[in-house]
Image (cartoon, helix red, strand yellow):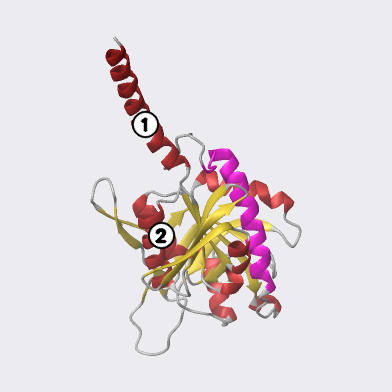
Amino acid sequence: MQKVVKKYVLSLLMVLALLVVPLMAEAAAPIMVEGAMECETDLLINALENPKDQRIGGWRFVSGEYQGIPVVVSVTSIGMTNAAAATVLGIEYFHPAAVINQGTAGGHDPSLHTFDIVLGGKTIDSSAWLSKRERRGADGRHIEMMPTFYYDADSGEEKKVLELEADPELLEIAAAEGANYQAGQVVIGKISSSNNWNRQLDRIRFFNKEHGSSCEEMETHSAALVCQNYKVPFLGIRILSNTEWHGEDFNQAAGTACQQYVLAVIKSYAERKVLKSGVAEKGKRA
């Protein structure tokens, strides 16, 4: 009789292990936060408990916990290619519950100033365009934007889209956190990405007026595209560190303010999704 009981107990424990372990592993999936430069990641890294610093290829990742929340800080380095590569590696290695790409940006919207934050409800690749055939001159107004191409993970079909949209829940939580931000205003807008630093006011005016661009930087759209392929919730958060509209030059302190705001967003999102280390709560991957 004892042998039969032991047999059933062992079978039950095996079934429970098969059910519980995957649930705990998924619940412990981290939030991955990306930043290109030290002034965009130093505060995030210093906020981590039990940090583990590692290199995958040439890209740096620091994993740890923030107030019990599993977090990975990805130091992508500058530019679209670096951001895309780091995002792929981070997703494949850490399997994050969500990705936030954050940092500094230059202003396109004349109503915004340094320390104002743009939540990227949409992102666009401002380097993807087709010009009209012209023998002379290079008029920026004579261009049309080209789409971003990607393969749908489910169907395998090639698709194209001009703009990529943020994860609605991440965007909602970040917008709500804006009520607590004291250094400027928080708006939902469009983040324009390319490997350019544009200081030509006419060109800035063009992208703002014709394509609704709120700010420009060099990483968000490429990270958003990778997350689109992997179906990982994504949000871009960018703080204005400079704007040609008002003659405001680059202010490194903006990077610190953005990181402080992002930590608050991480906490709110984790509370909503129950992303706590060791909590046996099945996560959800949109």
Mark 2 crowdedness (10 Å alpha carbons): few <14, some 14-19, many ≥20:
many
What amino acid type should be assigned to the residue bearing mark 2? Gly
Q: Nearer the viewer, residue 120 or 261?
A: 261
Q: Is residue 42 visible?
A: yes
Q: Which mark is residue 198?
A: none
Q: Which mark is residue 90?
A: 2
Q: Please, which residue is most extreme toward the left here?
A: 156
Mark 1 crowdedness (10 Å alpha carbons): few <14, some 14-19, many ≥20:
few
Q: Please, which residue is most extreme toward the right here?
A: 182
Q: Nearer the viewer, mark 2 or mark 1?
A: 1
Q: Nearer the viewer, residue 152 or 256?
A: 256
What amino acid type should be assigned to the residue bearing mark 1? Ala
Q: Nearer the viewer, residue 88 or 228?
A: 88
Question: What residue sits 57% from the left and 39% below the top?
Answer: 272
Question: What residue sits 41% from the left and 66% below the top?
Answer: 86
Instruction: Point out the stretch of residues depicted in magenta.
Output: 253-277
Task: Find residue 233 and report its horizontal and vertical position in percent.
Answer: 45, 49
Q: Please, which residue is most extreme toward the bottom here?
A: 136
Is most of the magenta stretch helix, strand or loop? helix
Task: Find residue 215 and report its horizontal and vertical position in percent.
Answer: 57, 68
| Cα gap from disc 2 to disc 1, whole angstroms | 27 Å
164 is higher (above) or lower (below) than 110: above
- Dividing the image into 4 quarters, which one contains the N terminus? top left
Question: What residue sits 45% from the left and 73% below the top?
Answer: 194
Image quadrant assignment for residue 42: bottom right
* SS for callout 1: helix
Sequence-earlier tag: 2 or 1: 1
Image quadrant assignment for residue 238: bottom right
